[in-house]
Amino acid sequence: MDKGVAIIVSGPSGCGKDTILRNLFKEHPEIKFSISTVTRPRRGIADEDAKYNFVTRDEFENMLKNDELLEYNVYVNNYYGTPKRPVVEAIENGDIMVIEVDVNGAASIRKKMPGIKSVFVMPPSIEELERRLSSRGTDSDEVVRKRIDEAKAEIARKDEYDYTIVNGVLENAVKELYNIIVNLK
Ligand code: 5GP
C-alpha cells in the first residue's frame, strides 16, 4: 500500500477556514482530520467536538511530558497541540490527513516533517476579518482584540506557506483546497 500524506492548513482566527474544512470533509469524507488537544474553553458551537479534544492544563502538560504531541503552541493564553500518533497512523495507513495549526505550529511541524506542504487561508479583507471576530459574540472584547492582533501577525507570515487561498467565494475556496490536496499523493 502507498504511504499516505499529511498537509498543514493555517489561517487567522475568523478567516473562515473552519467552514472551508467542514465543507471539504462533508464532500470528501475519505480525507482525515487531525483532532487537536486544547485547553481553551468551549464556545458552545455544535461542531467543536469534531475538531478539538478539550482537556485541563494538567492533562495537557502530562501529554507534553510523555512526548505525545507533534507540536504545540500557546495561543491567547491557552495550549493547542497536535497529537502525534494519529498523524503517524494516517500516513502508515495510506490516508490523507489535514493538520490545522497556527503559524507557529506549522513552523514546528516543518522542522519535524521536512517537505510537508502547507496552505494558508486568507480572509477576503482585514475589515471583514475584524467584523467576523467582533460579531461572533462568544469571546470577550479583550480576547477579540488579541485575536485581531494575532491574525495580523499570522498574515505577515503567509510567505512561509506553499499555497495561499483567499476565502472569498466559499465553494471556490473548497475546490481550490481539494485540488491542492489530491495532487499531493
Ligand atoms: P480557535 O480558538 O479559534 O479554535 O483556534 C485558535 C488558533 O489555534 C487558530 O489559528 C487555529 O488554527 C490554531 N490551532 C488549532 N489547533 C491547533 C493545534 O493543534 N496546534 C496549534 N499550534 N495551533 C492550533
Image (spheres, rainbow, N blue to C red):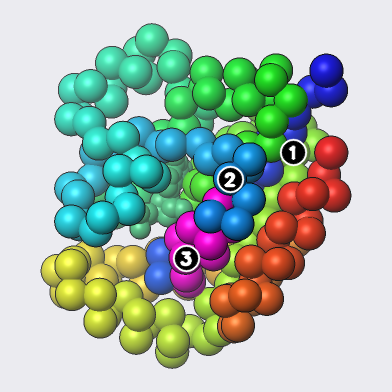
Residue that carries the numbered disc 2 in the rendered image: 29
Q: Is residue 113 left or right of residue 104?
A: right
Residue depth check, mark 2 versus mark 3: number of the one nearer the observer: 2
**Among the two numbered marks 2 and 3 on one chain, the one whose residue lies closer to the N terminus:** 3
Q: Quote the CA–CA distance across marks 1 and 3.
A: 23 Å
Which quadrant of the figure has residue 117?
Answer: top right
- Residue drawn at (18%, 30%) of the image: 56
> Mark 2 belongs to which amino acid?
Pro
Residue behind label 2 places its C-beta within 8 angstroms of ligand 1: no
Residue depth check, mark 1 versus mark 2: number of the one nearer the observer: 2
Q: Is residue 163 left or right of residue 28?
A: right
Residue that carries the numbered disc 3 in the rendered image: 19
Residue that carries the numbered disc 1 in the rendered image: 116
Residue 24 falls within the magenta-colored stretch: yes
Q: Is residue 158 visible?
A: no
Residue 134 position in % (x across, y down): 26, 80
Q: Is residue 95 visible?
A: yes
Which quadrant of the figure has residue 24?
Answer: bottom right
Give the extent of the magenta segment. 15-25
> Mark 3 belongs to which amino acid?
Thr
- Residue drawn at (49%, 58%) of the image: 22
